[in-house]
């Protein structure tokens, strides 16, 4: 069983899955150094990060070479943004601000070939070495982000229609907090209720579920309400932790 099939099975069986996100660093050697038996995949953030179709390709190719599954958070639900990312070699798509069945339909059309979707053939980097068409169709991860009350309301319908195409559901807590009227307060009562509701729906449909976490303490907190996908930290956050560990206080060499 290769790393991609292993991750797919972990999504299906709702096992513990660990990932992180890169927003600023686009150096393939740094990506290679991130390989760890404790890391299941890397998210490359094209929604808020500095990535474009030029500087992302080397990072995706390094992931393929190093054996690290890659997921790209695209800017929006649009065929050309999603299909292009798959063409470049991404192993999966994270779909921000997912609220409707139409958004999921667009994503599936862009990720899968006919008869499942409508993806164009292009992109020499999209197939893994020796990968068959059937393996491709079943081997790309779709991870919608639920970030609003409307997304929560429509989540059961999304899972009724597209559960087999969805690998996991992720809550974007900061956008959700804004939409609930409690900006950046991730522990407000409306936020707790929203996350518990998503967790409950995912448990009912036996679907993997996670929440972005700033640190391990938050990951442990969300794990208690049913999150099996631990999306922890950012490249910038890890850099600042290391920097502050040395320069965050006066240096004493005595």
Image (cartoon, rainbow, N blue to C red):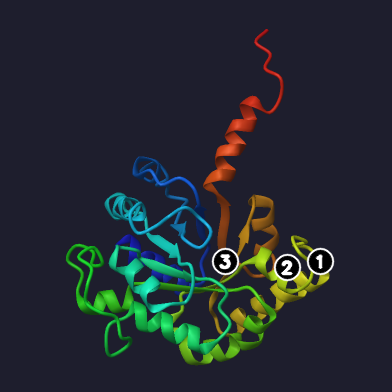
Dots 2, 1 in contact, CB < 8 A:
yes
168 above or below 124?
below
Query: Which is in the foreground here, disc 2 or disc 3?
Result: 2
**x and y, in percent, of residue 139 in the image:** 33, 73
3D distance between C-alphas at marks 2 and 3: 21 Å
Q: Name which residue lies at 53% across and 78% down.
A: 207
**Circle 2 sits on which residue?**
177
Q: CA distance from mark 2 to mark 1?
A: 8 Å
| Label 2 residue SS | helix
Q: Are marks 2 and 3 in contact (CB under 8 Å)?
A: no
Of residue 140 and residue 88, the one placed in the foreground of this image is 88
Q: Considering the image in quadrants, where does the C terminus appear?
A: top right
Query: Mark 3 sits on what residue?
Result: 228
> Earlier along the polypeptide chain: callout 2 or callout 1?
2
Give the label on residue 39, or none. none
Q: Residues within 10 Å of mark 1 (few under 14, many from 20)?
A: some
Position of 140 compared to 76: left or right?
Answer: left
**Tag 1 secondary structure:** loop
Please rate how many residues cluster around mark 3, counting C-alpha atoms within 10 Å: few if below 14, some from 14 to 19, many from 20.
many
Toward the top, the furthest residue is 254
Label 2 Cα neighbours within 10 Å, binned few <14 / some 14-19 / many ≥20: many
Q: Earlier in the sequence, mark 2 or mark 3?
A: 2
Kindly state the secondary structure of the residue where label 3 is placed.
loop
Q: CA distance from mark 1 to mark 3?
A: 22 Å
Say which residue appears at 46% left-offset and 75% top-offset: 167
The percent position of residue 225, horizontal first and vertical second, equals: 69, 69
| x 49%, y 47%: residue | 24
Indicate which disc residue 188 carries. Answer: 1
Q: N-terminal of the two: label 1 or label 3?
A: 1
Horizontal and vertical percent position of residue 124: 20, 65
């Amino acid at each position: 069983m290769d790393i991609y099939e292993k991750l797919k099975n972990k999504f299906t069986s709702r096992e513990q899955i660990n990932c992180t996100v890169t927003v600023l660093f686009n150096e393939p050697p740094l990506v290679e150094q991130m390989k760890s038996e404790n890391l299941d995949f890397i998210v490359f953030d094209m929604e808020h990060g500095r990535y474009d179709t030029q500087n992302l390709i080397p990072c995706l190719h390094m992931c393929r070479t190093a054996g690290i599954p890659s997921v790209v958070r695209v800017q929006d639900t649009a065929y050309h943004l999603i299909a292009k990312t798959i063409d470049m070699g991404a192993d999966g798509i994270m779909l921000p601000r997912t609220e409707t069945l139409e958004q999921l339909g667009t994503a599936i059309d862009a990720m899968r070939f006919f008869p499942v979707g409508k993806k164009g053939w292009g992109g020499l980097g999209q197939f893994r070495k020796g990968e068959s068409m059937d393996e491709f169709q079943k081997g790309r991860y779709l991870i919608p982000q639920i970030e609003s009350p409307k997304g929560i309301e429509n989540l059961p319908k999304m899972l009724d229609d597209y559960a087999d195409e969805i690998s996991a559901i992720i809550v974007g807590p900061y956008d959700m907090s804004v939409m609930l009227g409690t900006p950046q307060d991730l522990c407000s009562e409306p936020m707790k209720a929203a996350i518990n509701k998503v967790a409950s729906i995912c448990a009912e449909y036996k679907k993997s579920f996670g929440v972005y976490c700033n640190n391990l303490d938050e990951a442990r907190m969300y794990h208690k309400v049913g999150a099996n996908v631990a999306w922890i930290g950012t490249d910038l956050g890890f850099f600042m932790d290391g920097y502050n560990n040395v320069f965050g206080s006066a240096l004493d060499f005595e």
